[in-house]
Image (tube, rainbow, N blue to C red):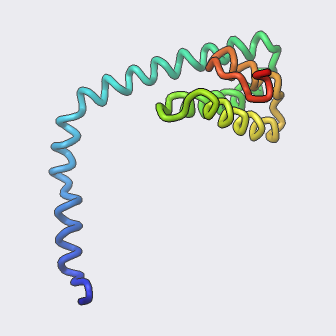
Amino acid sequence: MPADPNRRIEAWKAKYNIQRVKETLDDRKEQMLVNVQSQFAMLCSMEEQVREQLNESDVPTILYVPYLDFARQMYRLSMHRSIKGSSLAKETKVLVDKWEGRKLERVVLKRIALEVFNVTLPEDAH
């Protein structure tokens, strides 16, 4: 039996009822605000730690942006609750390889991974 387009339209309207979406968001707004505030605090703290590592490594300030981009990717990866241990180390190695391919220094990337995120690359675990 072919799908009835009117039935699909009605289902879409029910699902995307803007008033219902607004009510749901209003109910969750306070907790969402608490969550985002804590995430921003952790993110800013992480970025400050990365800047300290970059400063200690004598990285030119013009290169801070790509190193911070690497660190933000590491942050997202490290905050993912299902990726830990050797899996996190392997994923970190992939990120380091990627950013080294973008002409960042491997030693600095590894230092950020170790000092800020406490992750040792598999090749260094011996």
Q: Nearer the viewer, residue 89 or 110?
A: 89
In the image, 94: left or right of 74?
Answer: right
Please identify the quadrant where the N terminus is shown: bottom left
Residue appearing at x 40%, y 20% in the figure: 38
The image quadrant of residue 77 is top right
In the image, 32: left or right of 88?
Answer: left
In the image, 1: left or right of 110?
Answer: left
What is the total number of numbered labels drawn onto the structure image?
0
The image quadrant of residue 60 is top right
Q: Residue furthest bottom?
A: 1
> With respect to residue 23, does 58 lie above or below?
above
Q: Position of residue 56 (x, y in %)?
A: 77, 10
Q: Position of residue 34 (x, y in %)?
A: 31, 23
In the image, 8: left or right of 111?
Answer: left
Q: Position of residue 125 (x, y in %)?
A: 76, 22
Q: Nearer the viewer, residue 90 or 20?
A: 90
Residue appearing at x 81%, y 41% in the figure: 101
Q: Nearer the viewer, residue 49 or 114?
A: 114
> With respect to residue 86, does 38 lie above or below?
above
Q: Position of residue 39 (x, y in %)?
A: 43, 24
Residue appearing at x 53%, y 19% in the figure: 44
Please identify the quadrant where the C terminus is shown: top right
